Image (cartoon, coloured by chain):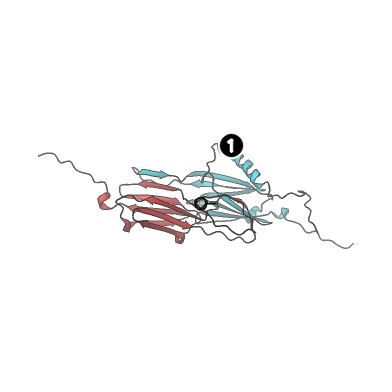
Chain colours: A red, B cyan
């Protein structure tokens, strides 16, 4: 298999049956589903990261990219056989182009019940400004 | 010494698990009146682990209020249902992505044994619901004492 195909395989999420006897294979990363909305003050990004606690999420901002990355700890079940697998995600990864005018120092992130909520406040200059039309005297 | 199952000679009760699963879910689709999307919350992704007497079921349900999750057990069937509330989006906001589902969800699983309804353990952490179900006492092997005549 050539290296491009190997790269592609790493990013695929597959559902597969794994009997307890086989060694665990490296688990693929998936892009989390997100809701993004924009108000006049900020962008809000909400991402579903089931299985991820707040210490397992990495949010980084680099140049004009916002990157969300998280690892999912695989459950250790020594005596159990895996019978049905619909989610074999090893972690989550998604990057976004960061819009201009974000005040990076004030980006806030919270994680609750496997949901990451990011607030990206707009800097003063980027907020919509109402221009008052003055009547000509 | 070989072990013989008188009721299911040579059959692994888990072999048909996937097929029975699909049948129960088709039934549910018709009952609820709308097609099951491939994604939670209408269709939370579930993993199932088993031992001889126990089934552990994990369901991905991020952002759900645990008090809004209902777990019902009847005979050999467990049904997980509930609601995920929509995110509060302020009026006038511009929506750029809307990928996360919300609303009612329900899934049913039929196990190859009757479930002990009084001993179901359910926990919700980090958006994952974990349910432990054990075999009902009447389905556990019963050791017959042999008395000398």
- Going 43% across and 48% down the picture, which residue do you hit? A34
Residue found at the far right of this picture: B149
Q: Where is residue A127 in the image (x, y as percent from the top left)?
A: 27, 48
Q: Tell me the crowding category of disc 1: few under 14, some 14 to 19, or many 20 or more residues within 10 angstroms, Cα based.
A: few
Task: Work out whether residue B24 or residue B83 is closer to the camera in this orientation and state it.
Answer: B24
Q: Where is residue A130 in the image (x, y as percent from the top left)?
A: 23, 44
B94 sits to left or right of B135:
left
Question: In which quarter of the view is residue A82 placed?
Answer: bottom right
Position of B76 relative to A56 (above/below): above
Please state the total of marks drawn on the protein image: 1
Q: Which residue lies under the disc numbered 1?
A: B30
B60 sits to left or right of B93:
right
- Going 72% across and 53% down the picture, which residue do you hit? B139
Question: In which quarter of the view is residue B123 placed?
Answer: bottom right
Position of A80 relative to A34 (above/below): below
B22 sits to left or right of A42:
right
Residue found at the far left of this picture: A137
- Going 64% across and 52% down the picture, which residue do you hit? B117
Q: Position of residue A44 (x, y in %)?
A: 37, 50
Q: Position of residue B85 (x, y in %)?
A: 46, 46
Subunit bearing disc 1: B
Residue found at the far bottom of this picture: B148
Task: Work out whether residue A12 or residue B147 is closer to the camera in this orientation and state it.
Answer: A12
Position of B91 relative to B149 (above/below): above
Is label 1 in a helix, a strand or a loop?
Answer: helix
Quarter in which the C terminus of chain A is drawn: top left
């Amino acid at each position: 298999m050539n290296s491009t195909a190997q790269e592609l395989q790493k990013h695929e999420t597959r559902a597969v049956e794994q009997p307890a006897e086989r060694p665990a294979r490296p688990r693929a990363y998936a892009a989390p589903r997100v809701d993004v909305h924009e108000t006049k003050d900020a962008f809000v990004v909400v991402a579903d990261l089931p299985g991820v606690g707040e210490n397992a999420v990495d949010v980084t901002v680099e140049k004009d990219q916002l990157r969300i990355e998280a690892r999912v700890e695989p459950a250790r079940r020594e005596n159990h056989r895996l019978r049905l697998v619909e989610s074999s995600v090893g972690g989550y990864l998604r990057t976004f182009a960061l819009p201009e005018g974000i005040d990076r120092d004030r980006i806030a992130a919270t994680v609750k019940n496997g949901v990451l909520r990011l607030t990206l406040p707009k800097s003063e200059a980027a907020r919509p400004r109402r221009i008052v039309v003055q009547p000509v005297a | 010494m070989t072990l013989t199952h008188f009721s299911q000679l040579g059959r692994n009760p888990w072999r048909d698990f996937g097929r029975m699963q699909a049948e129960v879910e088709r039934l549910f689709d018709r009952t609820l009146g709308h097609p099951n999307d491939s994604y939670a919350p209408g269709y939370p992704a579930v993993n199932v682990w088993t031992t001889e007497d126990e089934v552990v079921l994990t369901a991905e349900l991020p952002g759900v209020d645990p008090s809004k999750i209902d777990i019902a057990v009847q005979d050999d069937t467990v049904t997980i249902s509930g609601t995920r509330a929509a995110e509060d989006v302020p009026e006038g906001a511009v929506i750029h992505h809307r990928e996360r589902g919300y609303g009612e969800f329900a899934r049913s699983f039929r196990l190859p044994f009757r479930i002990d309804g009084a001993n179901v353990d359910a926990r919700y952490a980090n958006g994952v619901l974990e349910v432990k179900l054990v075999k009902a006492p009447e389905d556990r092997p019963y050791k017959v004492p042999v008395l000398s005549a």
